[in-house]
Image: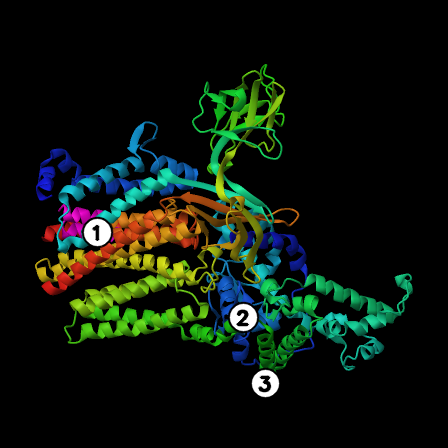
Amino acid sequence: MGSLRKNLQRNPAIKFCASLKITLTCLILLFILTFWGTIDQVYNGLYLAQQRFFNSFVFIFAGFIPFPGAQLVLWVFFINLVCVAIVRLVYKWSRIGLIVTHFGLLLFFVAAFVTLHGVEESHLTLMEGEAANVSSAYHDWEIAVWKESGSEKDVTAYDVEGLRPGRRLEFQEGLTLAVDHCYSNSEAYSGAEGAGTVLGASGIQTLKQAAPNKEPEKDLPGCILAVEGAGPVILYGAEDKPLKVSMDGRDHFLQLRRKNFPLPFLLRLKDFTVEWYPNTEVARSYKSLVEIIPPGGAGASREVLISMNKPLRYKNFTLYQSSYSVDNLGRESSTLAVVKNAGRLLPYFASFITFGGLALHFLLMAIRAKLKH
Amino acid sequence: MSRKITVLIYLLLLSCSHALAQPICPLDSSIKLKSAVSLDKFAALAVLNDGRIKPVDTYARTLLLQLSGKTSFGRQSAVEWLARLLFAPATTFEDKVFLINNPEIATALGVEPESRRRYSFSQLEPGVAKLEELARMAEKIESKERSVVEQEVLRVYQNAFLYDLHTRVFHFALPSAEFQITDQEIIKALDLPETQKIFSFYDLASRADRLQEQTKSLELGKPDSWPARDKELVLLMNNLLRWSMLYKDLPFSVIPGRDASTRGWLSPMDAISREFSDPHAREEIGYARGMVVHYWNGEQMPFDLAVRSLSNSVLNRVDAATQKNIRKIPLELFYNKANFFLWAKLFYALAFAVFLLSFFRTWPFLRQSALLLIAAGLIPHVGALVLRIVIMGRPPVSNLYETFIFVSMIGVIAGVIIELVNKRWVGNVVASVCGLVFLLIAGKFAAEGDTLQMLAAVLNSNFWLGTHVLTITIGYAGCCVAGLIGHLYILQRIRDPKDKAALESTYRNMIGALGFGLMMTFLGTTLGGIWADQSWGRFWGWDPKENGALLIVLWCAIIFHAKVGRLIGPLGVAVASVLGVIVVMWAWFGVNLLNIGLHSYGFTSGIATGLLAYVIGEVVFLGLCVPLARKRD
């Protein structure tokens, strides 16, 4: 073990990667990005700032100057930290605090990777008495297709993200769509421009690309597609009803909708309550009383009270009280945020390990200083 | 909060042209205010305001603070002034209680600007129409886009409206010309004192059934043909109705509604309109009226009796949780009266003065006396915090004001520990400066109103307030202490660069404080992440406040790594620690200036200038002292 470490320590590539200067550069770059990304939120909103500064590898500013994004910096930092752990950290009991701290930080990187790639965030809005077993995405959309067959429908869907003109989407029973245009945010018009007689479900004839909103939840995508054998169609995000396409005597239904995520249970909102501080308009608490009904009668249903700071946990799913609204008729609906995250506990472990290391190091240093003086 | 204000302003604009045009207090000239009564009992009366039960004393202080920026009116206490405003409003018309910071506004209202920036209602009244016009214009502008003057116009307008509302609270108990009865028969039928002609709304409302009885015999016909008695009866009924429409949604909620948990409490006049059928409420309204009458007559004992009867009746019919809150009122009165922070500031200032004295005199025990003074300051400081915890039943840090008080206390404790260990004045300086400066800043925030506030739903968790918020603020304190020691280190290098032992000791203290700051900020940040994961479903979301905390952690990590790599020496660490305080200020309240994100609370317009002045001050300090320190080496 010792000789392997010595060999690795002599490896110039690893030695370079473990350099303290790289550590410092990464820390300083992260400092700049964090500050810059905070200020940018004032002008561009959280989502766009996050995409530009934190989720990117490189971004351009002032028109042409490239700057490393946080994702690139964190990858470099991770490699740096791994190399430091291999060749630079001094594995002595007296350094135990620092060792634990740095391994805790490595776990943070793993947690960040898992969260970035493995989390599904969606939401579910229910009126009192309503039930659902799917939640919908905040800003991811899909093209869903089904055919009428009684009360049950078999839905096939394609993600809208990444759809390029010319792409062919094949659905069941020979229905094929060719993508003409897909806009992530668009405006719809009823008047036709040019010679098209394309129609959406609600009479839309033209789509125009629009600039993305500060809050991506407000973006309404639109797609112009060609149905093979039936001609062009328009799907628009704001349409409630699906577009009916008849082919070979069968009706197919097409809809552009927020991406749906199936839940492993049926959730019914039994009651929603807001408590106010008396004589004020300040809410003291929001609570949703829900009933969880397992699929196919597997196990008994149970009631759970979801409130601020008290989410519902079910396997990898966590449901949070997110917001609520009251419609014109005074009916209350509750919105629950649904998060599916297999690595939810990783940052918890990483936090406590890193803090434990810091505390240990601080304590050892204090004791040493006391003994010395 | 901003929504609440918008709604309020909207309501104001709807109703105000009509409301302010009304005579403020139709006091009958025949009654004279007798000598003042003692208001100790009145100050302890429970009132529901801003979502919590508080004593009238706190209510009065908050109101007066909001209007005038001070918690007393000349030599009069806030509660004495409030009593005049409520019971004898006309006596406050000449009181200069309206703070208008901007002389332009005073000029626009046709008032000669006053050097003390405070104006009386009589001065403002002729310009009310203009004020209303200006407020309407300011209201149309997005709140973020409003200029300082526009914000000030809205504030003054709101305050004028609030003042006006308070003048109406007890109108119901005062005789009014609108309830004048000339017909002795009516007086007799209503069982009113026959020697009197002018009565109050309350006198007639409490005899509404008899009045109705009298009006049954009225015959329809042309009003001109009505006999004088009928005319008078109709006029009385009409005025009763008009008053109950005009005087509603008044402040000073001292009477619990029947379903107090959801409907809140009511002012006596609103209670007459809505709860008069309830015998308890009726009784309590009677006590409230008694307070006015006895106040006017200068009758101490009956006044106290009325207050006590009202308190007692309320206490007996509210739920257990409210009872518990009402029972805490004496504690809050003590807290208000003791002025703990003033004492703490005084002792810290004295300790610092002793430190300055040590440059000129080498008397023995100077250092120990400074430490004792700091300990003396710490007693009221900690005491006040404990009282706040008991009164609110939650951890002591939930708004910006409280963070300053808490960070100040941690700084003082850290200073005391350093002084006990090192015995070289550094700890004394840290403790006295942290104590004094942060408490002075806290005083600025206290000027915004009641500092004991209710919590928004997401914050309403004692566990997370007690862990995340406390640890992160302890982290702020650690970094601030490190920055303060950084200043001292640089100054020591200039003053006596040869005293290596002293320099080494200060340096070690600085590194210790910085390490402690890093550790606690890290813990606070990640606990915040865990809280966010528990309540919003994500550990990290790049929210400005989260980023601010991350900046502190990164800054400390940069310092330690640069130190390990020998890229910076002790002087460099000192400079970085000094700059670290700016990073802390940014995370602590600088990001609140951006007014975005999930933590946007405690926005104060003065912060930006203060922060900028601080940054410039530090840059100048470093620019002057660092080259000098280098030269002295």
> How far apart, in angstroms, are the residues tagged by discs 2 and 3?
27 Å
The location of residue B465, given as percent across then percent down, is 39, 60
The residue at which mark 2 appears reads as: B322
Discs 2 and 3 carry the same chain letter: yes
Same chain under badges 1 and 2? The reply is: no
Q: In the drawing, what numbered circle is on residue A212?
A: none
Q: Amino acid at mark 1?
A: Val
Residue interval drawn in magenta: B558-579
**What residue is at 26 percent from the left and 54 percent from the top?**
A355
Q: Nearer the viewer, mark 1 or mark 2?
A: 1
Q: Earlier in the sequence, mark 2 or mark 3?
A: 3
- Say which chain tag 1 marks: A
Please give the name of the residue rendered at 51% of the width and 73% of the height, measured from the top-left corner: B324
Q: How is the image coloured?
A: rainbow
Asked if A16 appears above or below A333 in the picture, the reply is above
Which numbered tag is attached to residue A100? 1
